[in-house]
Amino acid sequence: MVIKSKQAATNTTRLLSSRALLLPGMAVVSLLLVGCLLWSITLGAADITPEVVFTALFNFDETEFDHLIIQTVRLPRVLAGALVGAGLAVAGAIMQGLTRNPLADSGILGINAGAAFAVVMTVYLVGSPSLSIYAVAALIGAAAAAVIVYGLASIGRGGPTPLRLTLAGVILTAFVSSLTTAILIQDQETLDQIRFWTAGSLAGREMPLLQQTAPIVLAGLVGSLLISRQITTISLGEDVAKGLGQNTLLVKGIAAVMVVLLAGGSVALAGPIGFVGLIIPHIARFIAGVDYRWIIPYSALLGAVLVTVADVVARIALRPQELPVGIMMAVLGAPFFIYLARWKVRR
């Protein structure tokens, strides 16, 4: 069993066949991300030149209207998109590695829906909670959804197989989403406060909210990197990990906490944006192979790029109107999900 798993890992196709190319590859993706972020800042109701953007970032003048727009509106939005993309992508990578389920994603497995329901319920009960309450509610909802999905998938013989996890996640997502919709329909005030947020949006994100949620997501990213070697071992098989003396239960527990931090913090910041954690880990594995010490950083960078570009497209597709970035991700992710369900899962 160990020999077969190691052979499978060795024979896995990856774009950068040499380990020496992986670090330069990350540098290229990092430059791509910086370019996308700067491009996103220049776009809006009024286009701003890159020169003005550079000046506003490094030589801010509060008397300049364009500088104020960049610092108070566009920069927080761009940073929020990058953070959310990185968090959701890494959460999906961890879930796919631990469950060996190519369809694993915080959106598909109900974690995003649980976090969103908790936030909506909090707004419904409290009215206008503080930003820190948003974050706490999202984390609680994400954790509860993860426990429920895993519990449902574990019922019966065979345990939580990839198919059972996916079905349990889809069922919980449908149920919780219907409850969320019922609350929003019943309470017009709650609907007015967060209706755009429930579709997954970066519009109107301000620096205070980013400052409240960024430490949560960053803690999840750092923790994920620290356990990346152990995730690699588990992704090769439970027997392999135990044979190497790894405490798989402890690693899975820590990884679950990281997923809750990443997905809960991301949902608190931008709402339930789906498919990022489904698409990006597959691209990262295609580039870097099966080693999660590379998959996780590549997923973070590529996820940030994807959400940033999707947000740009959402802003310019129907100018002067704006689409939620969650809708753009659904357009991109649905065909990819069908492809995975049709070929990857069956194989």
Image (spheres, rainbow, N blue to C red):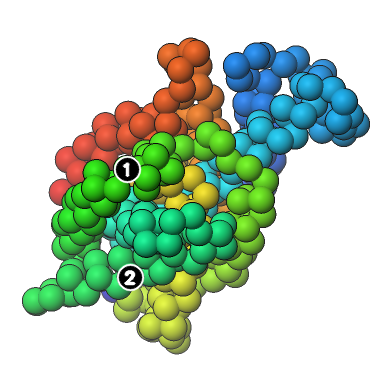
- Identify the residue at horizontal 49%, vertical 45% (top origin): 270
Query: In this rendering, does residue 62 appear at all?
Result: yes
Q: Position of residue 52 (x, y in %)?
A: 81, 20
Left or right placement of residue 248 versus residue 308 in this view: left
Nearest to viewer (mark 2 / mark 1) = 1
Q: Position of residue 285 (x, y in %)?
A: 45, 48
User: Tags 2 and 1 in contact by the CB under 8 Å rule?
Assistant: no
Q: Quick one: SS at disc 1?
A: helix
**Of residues 217 and 126, the one drawn nearer to the viewer in this rendering:** 126
- Identify the residue at horizontal 43%, vertical 14% (top origin): 318
Res. 245 image quadrant: bottom left
Residue designated by label 2? 144
* Real-space CA distance between mark 2 and mark 1, rounded to the nearest whole angstrom: 26 Å
* Circle 2 Cα neighbour tier, 10 Å, few/some/many (<14 / 14–19 / ≥20): some
Left or right placement of residue 42 versus residue 252 in this view: right
Position above or below: 30 against 221: above
Residue 230 numbered mark, or none: none
**Of residues 221 and 313, the one drawn nearer to the viewer in this rendering:** 313
- Identify the residue at horizontal 66%, vertical 40% (top origin): 76
Position above or below: 216 against 180: below
**Of residues 38 and 248, the one drawn nearer to the viewer in this rendering:** 38
